[in-house]
Amino acid sequence: MTTHELAPAQVRTAGPGITFAMAAATGIAVANIYYNQPMLALMEQELPGPLAGAIPTATQLGYALGLFLLVPLGDLMERRRLIVVQFVLLAGALVLAALAPNAAVLTFASLMVGLGSTVAQQIVPLAAHLAAPEKRGSTVGTVMAGLLSGILLSRTLAGFVATHGGWREMFWLAVPMSLGAAAFMGLVLPRSAPDTRMGYGRLIASIVELWNAYPTLRLAAATQALIFAAFSVFWTILAFRLEAPRFGFGPDIAGLFGLIGAVGIFAAPLAGRFADRNGPTGAVLLGTGVALVSWIVFGAWGTLAGLVVGCVLLDFGMQSALVSHQHIIYALKPEARARLNTAFMGVMFLGGAAGSGLGTLAWNAGGWGLVSALGIGFGLAAALLQGAARLRLRAG
């Protein structure tokens, strides 16, 4: 066995170079889900049709399908090869999107882009797999900071490129980024033998078994789903809030909030180090509380400064809880980390979808006041869920 190949029983270590490489690749992958959001109006102008409005939905659907159908393969296949292949397939989907002659083809390409972008969720469990136990929290935190960077900065990049070049140029730019990430991951990642020999069908069925077997997984997923719902409410409604007469800003300013929210990126490694030293439970409680406070700020401080402060708090809280929850679930069953991640992230994204949908309904029905109440409700539900779990633990 070469020094570049790791068996499951060996001690795994991920140095700073590999960790930052994985963080960058994760951000590059997940950004593809969000490029279309600021460009949708331009797409609809060029490719009119009833399907054009379904493009973001198709991308999210593709991502959800990938979470349940592709991410579990990380427990079944050699991870480095799987990551490289999925990045190449993602590049192919981006080419199809850039060349799309009509809305139907673009919608299908968007579905494939979402499917391929789940390579980000292949990298996160691998980071935990490679990290030494005492550094797992900080390692996962650094990689998750890369993921949050991709989520927040993708809208800013896409808005700039689309404004000055066009929406197709953004997809063309994403192609070499994906291919470059594939090449880089192929060069720097060590080989790691699969952790299971079960068949694919049995592998998928085992996700339900893991969900039923671990109350900790269910608690983490439910809590994070509520926090991500609050997060999605804000980012879904922000552009509408900013263009209202109170502010009168356009989509360019909404895009700049991605840069403001990026301050929350620093929460990931901080939360990871906190979890390594003190355990992840305290960091989960901190993140949940900060997310709730952010929506209180949004509701009570109705100025642009309030939006900025609340945005930073919300991103900080969401990221702190997310990294700490992953620290918890990856320790449950190391040989099933990809499947644990599938269950956790799948439920989390269901919460995000619910937040987006309910946020839109709240905005149309009652404006920012009702939206703020909805965000507070999600944050309060997450806090109560964690509080009840702690009371049960003490009583038991």
Image (tube, rainbow, N blue to C red):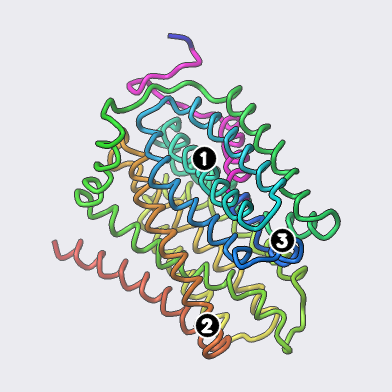
Q: Which residues are magenta?
A: 3-31
1 and 2 marks in contact (CB < 8 Å): no
Vertical comparison of 177 with 320: above or below: above
Marks 2 and 3, Cα distance to the nearest angstrom?
32 Å
Q: Position of residue 357 (x, y in %)?
A: 48, 73
**Of callouts 1 and 2, which one flags the residue occurring earlier in the amino acid sequence?**
1
Q: Amino acid at mark 3?
A: Leu
Q: Amino acid at mark 1?
A: Val
The residue wearing badge 1 is 119
Classify mark 3: helix, strand or loop: loop
Image disc number at residue 47 = 3
Mark 1 vs mark 2: give the one in front. 1
Q: Nearer the viewer, residue 385 or 337?
A: 337
Classify mark 1: helix, strand or loop: loop
**Of callouts 1 and 3, which one flags the residue occurring earlier in the amino acid sequence?**
3
Q: Residue at x 39, y 64 (%)?
A: 285
As drawn, is 172 to the left or to the right of 296?
right
Q: Position of residue 42 (x, y in %)?
A: 75, 63
Q: Residues within 10 Å of mark 1 (few under 14, many from 20)?
A: many
Picture quarter with the C terminus: bottom left
The residue wearing badge 2 is 371
As drawn, is 254 to the left or to the right of 271?
right
Q: Position of residue 84 (x, y in %)?
A: 55, 29
2 and 3 marks in contact (CB < 8 Å): no
Residue 16 lies in the magenta-colored region: yes
Q: Is residue 185 visible?
A: yes
